[in-house]
Image (cartoon, grey):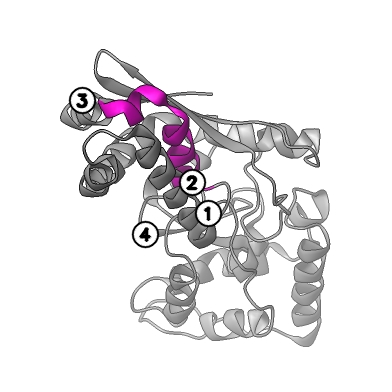
Amino acid sequence: MWTLPIPPRDGSSDDLVTAFKRSRPGTDAYTLNSSETTAIDALYDRYDELNGRRHPDLAVPGFEEVLTQAIIRAYNETYPGGRIFELRNRLKLAAERCPFCGFAEISDLDHHLPVSEFGALAVYRRNLVPSCGPCNNKKRTAGRGNSAEELIHAYFDQIPNEKFFVATARLAQGALVVTLRVERSQSMSVELYERLKFQVERLDLSRRYRAAVNTLLLEQEAGFELAFGQGDPERLSAFLDLSAEKYAMRFGLNDWRTALLTSLAAESSFCAGGFRQALGAAGRASTNGP
């Protein structure tokens, strides 16, 4: 969740060369000249220097409009049957789950900087982030120049290895209510903190976690029962702490599952047998926003 390995830069220009070839009846081929190839490489260099952040150099790279439009059309070649469909597959396979929400399956490629403003980057692999459909759709109108209203870049942003995504769990009338929120860690900049908070809010993650939380709890039911045994809340709490450690090792310190299980381990009423009520009312379990 949050970040992914940066795709290799090598071959990025070749993606365009391949996509520009005529592939279907009625489509126009486009042949890059040497100066255009140099300009595209310079644009990609500038994108990397800026870590994918909004900048006029990226929005208006000095290309002829005919080239920009050709690049925008070339993105269609990433779809099934297109000349660079393999690029789409390779990028999507780089993530087990959507990096924005951490639980949904990958279905889309998100343009980190939108094509509507940054058309020349439409096929740059480092501007294409695998995502789920709901996150991609909710992200579309984010940003627009306000640095605090931008989602983090899954490839370029440096996320501190400190706990900042936390959960609070409590039982209310037998149902489990979970609050997931971002807290600023010691080394986290104010700007990054604001952007992480905005991401959670913009993508409506707290509401969307409800079903994922219920699913995880139901999957763990047998483990909860075995750990609780004849009525040992401390043993169940230790089991939850150990489970949180395992999730942190696999998915990260700030994965939502890590945060949830850590919170449950500290919730005395849950560990004292309340988990049975929570599981019985799983359809009523809910999450609150930050």
For the point 34% across and 79% down, which residue is it? 81
Q: Residues within 10 Å of mark 2 (few under 14, many from 20)?
A: many
User: Looking at numbered disc 3 in the image, what kind of residue is underneath it?
Assistant: Gln
Label 4–label 2 contact, CB within 8 A = no
Which residue is at the front of the view, 220 or 53?
A: 220
Lateral position of residue 162 relative to residue 102, left or right: right
Q: Position of residue 231 (x, y in %)?
A: 25, 33
- Whole-number angstrom distance, CA of label 1 to CA of label 2: 6 Å
Q: Which residue is mark 3?
A: 277
Mark nearer the N terminus (1 vs 2): 1
Label 1–label 2 contact, CB within 8 A = yes
Q: Is residue 122 among what the camera can see? A: yes
* Range shown magenta: 255-273
Label 3–label 1 contact, CB within 8 A = no
Which residue is at the front of the view, 109 or 205?
A: 205
- Whole-number angstrom distance, CA of label 3 to CA of label 1: 27 Å
Q: Which residue is mark 4?
A: 107
Q: How many marks?
A: 4
Q: Secondary structure at mark 3?
A: helix
Q: Secondary structure at mark 1?
A: helix
The outermost residue toward the left is: 280
Label 3–label 2 contact, CB within 8 A = no
Q: Secondary structure at mark 2?
A: helix
Mark nearer the N terminus (3 vs 1): 1
Q: Which residue is mark 2?
A: 258
Lateral position of residue 225 relative to residue 289, left or right: left
Q: Position of residue 138 (x, y in %)?
A: 46, 38
- Whole-number angstrom distance, CA of label 3 to CA of label 4: 35 Å
Which residue is at the front of the view, 55 or 250?
A: 250
Q: Which residue is mark 1?
A: 248
User: Looking at numbered disc 2 in the image, what kind of residue is underneath it?
Assistant: Thr
- Whole-number angstrom distance, CA of label 1 to CA of label 4: 25 Å
